Image (tube, rainbow, N blue to C red):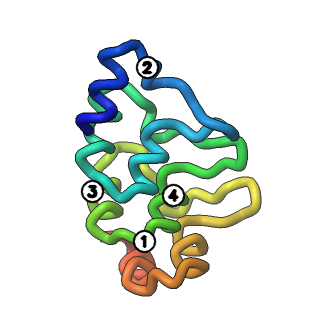
Amino acid sequence: VEACAWLASHGADVHATAKDNVNTFHWAVWGRNIATCEWALAAGVDPLAVNRWGCSAIHWAGAAGDVPLCKWLSKIPGMDFSQRNNQGHDGLKKASWNGHWELCEWLLQGAQ
């Protein structure tokens, strides 16, 4: 968070995207850092944005495999754990590919 705040205070564009339209919120989710996710939200970064491949924060969270992070994400209005990307993959598929069995179980229980 401190690095993000420092960069923003020195002119970094918090809305800039990396290759394939990956935004700051996606990176924070993939990094499994709720505090940075909160910072990105407060800075106005769209948590529901999708990248070039149709991947949302849900896909990044599935790849990261962090249940507490996913529980936190589930409180964001519009966050859809069944959302599929351009290849038809959802967060469960990403979690299973990466061997995140605890997250798979949570997602299969309805992401409660």
Q: CA distance from mark 2 to mark 4?
A: 23 Å
**Which residue in the protein does label 2 denote?**
12
Residue found 46% across the figure and 81% down from its top: 100
Q: Which mark identifies residue 60?
A: 4
Residue found 35% across the figure and 21% down from its top: 8
Q: Who is closer to the viewer here, 107 or 17?
A: 17
Q: Sequence-wise, which precedes: disc 4 or disc 1?
A: 4
**Which residue in the protein does label 3 denote?**
72
Question: Vertically, is 103 above or below 41?
Answer: below
Q: Sequence-wise, which precedes: disc 2 or disc 3?
A: 2
Q: Which numbered disc, 2 or 4, marks the residue closer to the eye?
A: 2
Q: Is residue 2 left or right of residue 50?
A: left
Q: CA distance from mark 1 to mark 2?
A: 29 Å
Type of the residue with mark 3: Trp
Residue found 42% across the figure and 50% down from its top: 79
Q: CA distance from mark 2 to mark 3?
A: 26 Å
